[in-house]
Amino acid sequence: MKKTLRYLRPYGGTVVAGLILKFIGAVAELFLPLLLEYIINDVATNAALSHDNKINMIIFLGIAMLGCSFAALFGNVFANRLTVKSSGNMTHDLRYDLFKKTCYLSSRQVDEFGVPSLISRLTSDSYYVNQMVARTLRLGVRAPILILGGTILAFWRDPVLACVLLGCVPLVGVAIFVITKKSVPIYFGVQKRQDDMVRKVQENVTGVRVIKALDKGEYETERFDALVKDLAAEEFKANKIMSLSHPVATLILNLGLVAIIAAGAALGSKSGTVLAFLQYFVIILNAMIALSKIFVVISRGSASAARIEKVLDTDVSETTESSQKRNTGYKIQFENVSFSYNGVKDNLHDIDFGIYAGQTLGIIGATGSGKSTIINLMMRFYDPDGGAVYVDDVNVKSYRVKELRKKFGVAFQNDFLMADTLKENIDYGRDLDDEMINKAIISARASEFIDALPDKLEHRLAQKANNLSGGQKQRILIARALAAHPEILILDDSSSALDYETDAALRRSLKKDYDDITKVIVAQRISAIKNADLILVMDDGEIIGRGKHDELMASCEEYAMIYATQMGGDNA
Ligand SMILES: Nc1ncnc2c1ncn2[C@@H]1O[C@H](COP(=O)(O)OP(=O)(O)OP(=O)(O)O)[C@@H](O)[C@H]1O
Ligand SMILES: [Mg+2]
């Protein structure tokens, strides 16, 4: 919580100005009952004053009351504006840092937090922190001043009546405390169920096509309905308890008012004093109810702040190990690498291969056999548990991550495109010159469809590039990977949506225009990797066949089988 609150520090001036205005507003509000008491006790009922004098004084005091009312109103309004400003700025800074940190988390750290959880920390949790700060600044000073000031003034005016008043206040305090304490855990339950619902909505909206294709609309609706019902039931429970607080406080308030009037009558207090006490009583009770609400917001906000701080406190500093440069001459080399995502079962086992600069590595194998995992280790998204990965004869652990990644141009499996222009999607903030971009577009076989667009490269993509076909998306992704002319090109299942002819043409232009680049091509189709200098056949995290196409046809039964099943369409 401390770390989160530190984000308020740069806006300390605004916070203090807001609190001073709140203070002025609260004090002005406390003066109103005093003035009213004076008008009734010492002016209106004062036989010693002439009629005209009385009228003049009442008008004068009335204006003073108006002045106090306006001071209370404006003090509050301007203070609230400053509060919104400082809490808004603070949330902005917090979200900025949180987002930045999220971008620098390692893949393993992202796995640990979970993507939905990171999203909710950035959205709802930071919102709850904002609510906590804003509410506390708005009411956290005002309510205590009203309670304390009201009590002091009440004692000053009439200690006996003040005792009656103070007798009722703890009753309200206990009632509100009990009610709030019961409702806070239920509110946490509501928050969790809201997260579940948001996750379900996200899943369903993202997967709407699958749901339609499998005709699972009703099934999903029922599951969603169950979640919503659960959420509604929990909200009902929380609101049922919280809705008690107002009637209970009002009941005690009314009992208190009766007690004050009765005590006033018994003690022969003046009517103005009794009236002033009634007002103080209302002010104090309302302030207590406000404080109880802050309590709820603070409980919720501090839980969210803790979740946010957990991400902010994560160490994302690079660990680089110094090592000797070797002289094998390989561009990329895996040496007896084994790796597991969860530490239970090896996802890669004893992976050992090397390729030279300018060569092509093809990787083929069943779903889940570890193809993408090899790429993940090559780019150091994860570190191997055993063995080592070398790029340019240097252990990848010895590179600054930025330097290592600069060597790669990548089109990942199911990669994403942004809702921006085609040009920005290819350039991706790298300020590449037009010539490089155009060359990449031509080689990626994307020029044909881009030229047909009226606004060409300025064409804007819809969210998730939904206005492009699968094959068009892949061509843009390949162009992005090629555009900076990287040392190593990685295409992870990136040509699966291309027709055979386009796929073959892509390979021809890669050979012609980007021959110096070392290529790693993960594919399901043998045609995409047939001419590779080294092909790895993967199965369940192990290499079960290696070599060139012809060698594998002779030596690897599985490879020959894949080839046989794909023969019909393969003529590249
Ligand atoms: N982030 C992750 N956390 C835990 N397990 C993972 C993670 N990513 C992949 N795996 C597991 O590791 C194994 C290898 O996955 P990988 O993505 O490398 O397969 P692949 O060969 O690329 O498959 P595909 O052809 O479907 O892309 C799979 O069993 C998969 O479930
Ligand atoms: Mg994969």
Image (spheres, rainbow, N blue to C red):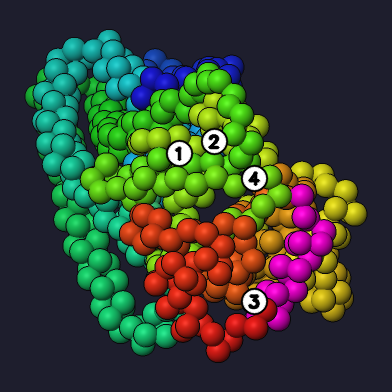
Residue closest to the eye, 498 or 133 = 498
User: Which residue was labeled with disc 3?
Assistant: 498
Seen in the picture, residue 504 relative to 116 is either above or below; the reply is below
**Helix, strand or loop at mark 2:** strand
Alpha-carbon distance for marks 4 and 1? Answer: 15 Å
Locate residue 472, reporting x and y percent. 69, 73
The quadrant holding residue 44 is top left
Residue drawn at (86%, 70%) of the image: 455
Alpha-carbon distance for marks 3 and 1? Answer: 33 Å
Q: Residues within 10 Å of mark 1 (few under 14, many from 20)?
A: some
Task: Find residue 304 and name its label.
Answer: none
User: Which residue was labeled with disc 2?
Assistant: 390
Q: Is residue 466 left or right of residue 241?
A: right
User: Which residue was labeled with disc 1?
Assistant: 335
Residue furthest right in the image: 435
Task: Tell whether label 2 touches label 4 (CB within 8 Å).
Answer: no
**Helix, strand or loop at mark 4:** strand
Q: Earlier in the sequence, mark 2 or mark 3?
A: 2
Q: Earlier in the sequence, mark 3 or mark 1?
A: 1
User: Which residue was labeled with disc 4?
Assistant: 356
Q: Which residues are magenta?
A: 499-516
Residue drawn at (73%, 69%) of the image: 506
Seen in the picture, residue 300 relative to 489 is either above or below; the reply is above
